[in-house]
Image: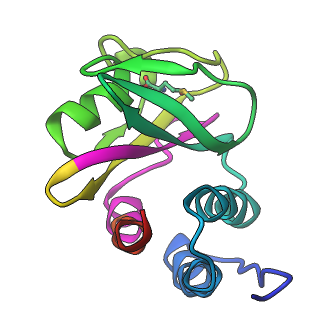
């Protein structure tokens, strides 16, 4: 595995095009799920500098906090609650331009202003979510959704 990431400046499409193959190279050499999820958070944080990046994994009827980068966060989220619980329930990507406008948003930190949550699917079931929060409004759009879906496809192969 490469010991250092090559970080890309410029438009976020170029940033995704640079970081996704590097993440692929990291995870394809390692079978441990937690190690891979942890490195994915670190790589995204290094490339994009987002406020909070982390995984919640389905355990019974809750999402439980997994590997993440950023300030401490809520540890358990019920199905249907907040953005994460909604993405799990709906099995859909949710982009929230302004968290204050999302009914039931769980404010782990008042610094979080916008977010994107993507479900991780395995054999037709949601087994977890990737939650990315920004401390700026309107940080995520279709470009993020499309590229992060490619990351979800990588994760679905090893989770
Ligand atoms: N924003 C999430 C809660 C998790 S924290 O932001 C890390 C939500 O409403 O689902």
Query: Picture coordinates of residue 84 (x, y %)?
Result: 37, 31
Identify the residue shown where x is 46% and y is 15%: 106
Magenta range is: 126-148
Identify the residue shown where x is 25% and y is 46%: 126
Q: Is residue 60 above or below residue 8?
A: above
Looking at the image, which is closer to me, 14 or 34?
34
| Displayed quadrant of residue 123 | bottom left
Q: Is-magenta flag for residue 128?
A: yes
User: Is residue 51 among what the camera can see?
Assistant: yes
| Displayed quadrant of residue 104 | top left
Instruction: Left or right? Give the position of 36 relative to 88.
Output: right
Q: Is residue 20 above or below residue 32?
A: below
On the rendered image, what quadrant is the N terminus found in? bottom right
On the rendered image, what quadrant is the C terminus found in? bottom left
Identify the residue shown where x is 55% and y is 84%: 28
Instruction: Left or right? Give the position of 67 relative to 118.
Output: right
């Amino acid at each position: 595995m490469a010991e250092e990431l090559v970080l890309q400046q410029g438009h976020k499409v170029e940033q995704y095009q640079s970081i996704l193959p590097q993440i692929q190279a990291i995870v394809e050499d390692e079978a441990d799920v937690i190690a891979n999820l942890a490195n994915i958070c670190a790589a995204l944080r290094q490339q994009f500098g987002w406020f909070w990046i982390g995984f919640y994994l389905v355990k019974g009827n809750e999402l439980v906090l997994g590997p993440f980068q950023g300030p401490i966060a809520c540890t358990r989220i019920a199905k249907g609650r907040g953005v994460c619980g909604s993405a799990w329930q709906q099995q859909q990507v949710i982009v929230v331009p302004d968290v204050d406008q999302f009914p039931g948003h769980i404010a782990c930190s008042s610094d979080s202003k916008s977010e994107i949550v993507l479900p991780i699917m395995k054999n037709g079931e949601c087994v977890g979510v990737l939650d990315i929060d920004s401390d700026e409004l309107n940080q995520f759009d279709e470009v993020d959704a499309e590229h992060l879906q490619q990351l979800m496809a990588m994760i679905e192969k090893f989770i």
